[in-house]
Amino acid sequence: MYFAALLARTEDGWEASDTELDDVEALSDLTDLAREASAGAEDDTVLVFIEQEDAWFGVVRVDGEEDPRIYVSDAAAAARSSYGEILLTDELLGKDPDQDELDALDLDGTEDGEPDPADEDEAGDDDTADPAAEIVPPGPIGDRLILADLGVSERELLALDTNDALSEIAEVLGAAEVLETVR
């Protein structure tokens, strides 16, 4: 089960709204949604909370027109989720999005990441390998200081339990009550 909410910081405090991510296909769509929630003030901070129950949570922070900042508690778990894939951009994963497919070809005719047939014979048949697990590292990924100026240090962020992380973050922000109204 997924939960997604927007928390917009305004002059009067935090305002929360639940949000549907059905029409969100990319990080740019999510960023646009966050900017629309900022109640017109260009420099307001908007946090997008996304969680998959018992698996992972993510926070996207949009400050005005700046590029979004992203934190995901478990990249490998998020990679198996359609909403998580929105957050796991090439930049966040350290991939070069401009790499041409031809550049990925090895001289032996295989593509990078494609096993060499000779190596397969030695390794045996292992059908349990998850291709996403090889590409996406397990554990936290992204900007660990995303909430530091709001009172949640890197250490505290990394120590959060997936089950109630968003509530704990909202509590520190002073937004627990408004978040619970949309939960």
Image (tube, rainbow, N blue to C red):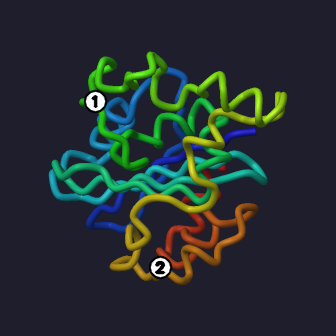
Distance of label 2 from label 1 (alpha carbons)? 32 Å
Q: Quadrant of the N terminus?
A: top right
The x and y percentages for residue 48 are: 45, 50
Q: Which residue is mark 2?
A: 154
Q: Residue drawn at (47%, 74%), measured in percent from left and top? A: 173
Amino acid type, label 1: Gln
* Disc 1: CA contacts within 10 A as few (<14), some (14-19) or many (>=20): few
Q: Residue drawn at (47%, 35%), measured in percent from left and top? A: 86
Q: Which mark is residue 42?
A: none
The x and y percentages for residue 97 are: 30, 33
- The image quarter containing residue 140 is bottom right
Q: Is residue 179 above or below residue 68?
A: below
Q: Nearer the viewer, residue 79 or 94?
A: 94
Q: Residue drawn at (38%, 67%), measured in percent from left and top? A: 146
Q: Nearer the viewer, residue 113 or 143?
A: 113
The x and y percentages for residue 167 are: 64, 66
Q: Which residue is mark 1?
A: 99
Amino acid type, label 2: Glu
Q: Secondary structure at mark 1?
A: loop
